[in-house]
């Protein structure tokens, strides 16, 4: 069970300090948005390279961008240990996943709330993680979509059939009140933005989330 705080909810003027606040987490989740794939713009490769130089924990890059076939490998080459592309934007997802792995990153496929997992199940052989979005990507602080839990279950079942160590990540509206349903459905990597950075003590918020799911095993 791993916690990946999203720095989207952090103070962008003090990112090094903000990464240190969550150094007890497993990953730091970095939301890259290009104002095309999603209607919001955050940061790109130069900032991610700077974050990699100072982060005490590995970076989990979530690319909400067009043309990930072209751009995602650069994040892996830069040193992000997990790179997530959206299946809705990828042209050659299998080739892209293999390229990410060859560059030393864990390869992850993300699904927007309206995207079905079924047609993409055959990609599991080339993936290390599947991200089931529990909000419409683009903004932090939105409400958790409980209607995505059947998809989390479906992905976990498919992974059990397939075998191998493939993680299931949830992202969006994950908090102390929603995290247990995610774990129950089969998630094992939990992204939390406002629930962590909105807390006075971010490290304590991470431990609280971890404790809530620590008894679940998949
Ligand atoms: C949304 C991003 C999320 C976001 C989560 O598009 O992918 O990572 O930061 O924020 P919260 O936890 O506040 O919903
Ligand atoms: Zn994200």
Image: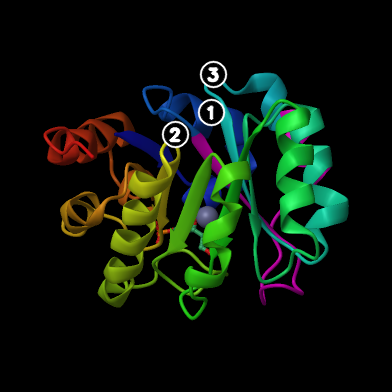
- Name the residue tied to disc 1: 17
N-terminal-most mark, 3 or 2: 3
For the N terminus, the image quarter is top left
- Name the residue tied to disc 3: 56
Of marks 3 and 2, the one in the foreground: 2
Name which residue lies at 81% across and 41% down: 73
- Name the residue tied to disc 2: 164
| Local SS, label 3 | loop
Q: Magenta stretch containing residue 41, yes or no?
A: yes
In the rendered structure, are the residues bearing label 3 and label 2 in contact, judged by CB atoms less than 8 Å apart? Answer: no
Residue nearest the observer in this picture, 98 or 207:
98
- Cα distance between the residues tagged 3 and 2: 28 Å
Q: Is residue 165 above or below residue 42?
A: above
| Mark 1 C-beta to ligand 1 under 8 Å | no
Of marks 2 and 1, the one in the foreground: 2
| Local SS, label 1 | helix
The region drawn magenta spans: 28-50
| Total labels drawn | 3
Category of crowding for the residue at label 1, using alpha-carbon neighbours closer than 10 angstroms: few (below 14), some (14–19), many (at least 20) = some
């Amino acid at each position: 069970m791993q916690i990946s705080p999203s720095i989207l909810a952090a103070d962008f003027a003090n990112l090094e300090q903000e990464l240190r606040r969550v150094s007890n987490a497993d990953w730091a989740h970095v939301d890259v948005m290009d104002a095309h794939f999603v209607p919001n713009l955050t940061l790109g490769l130069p900032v991610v390279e700077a974050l990699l130089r100072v982060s005490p924990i590995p970076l989990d890059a979530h690319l909400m961008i067009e043309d990930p076939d072209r751009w995602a490998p650069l994040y892996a080459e830069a040193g992000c240990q997990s790179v997530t592309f959206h299946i809705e934007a990828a042209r050659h997802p299998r080739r892209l996943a293999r390229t990410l792995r060859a560059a030393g990153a864990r390869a992850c496929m993300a699904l927007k709330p309206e995207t079905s997992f079924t047609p993409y199940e055959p990609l599991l052989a080339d993936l290390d993680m599947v991200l089931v979005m529990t909000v419409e990507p683009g903004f932090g602080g939105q409400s958790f979509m409980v209607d995505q839990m059947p998809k989390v279950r479906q992905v976990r079942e498919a992974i059990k059939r397939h075998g191998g160590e493939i993680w299931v990540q949830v992202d969006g509206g994950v908090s102390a009140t929603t995290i247990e349903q995610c774990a129950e459905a089969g998630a094992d990597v939990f992204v939390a933005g406002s629930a962590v950075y909105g807390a006075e003590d971010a490290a304590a918020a991470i431990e609280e989330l971890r404790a809530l799911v620590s008894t679940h095993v998949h």
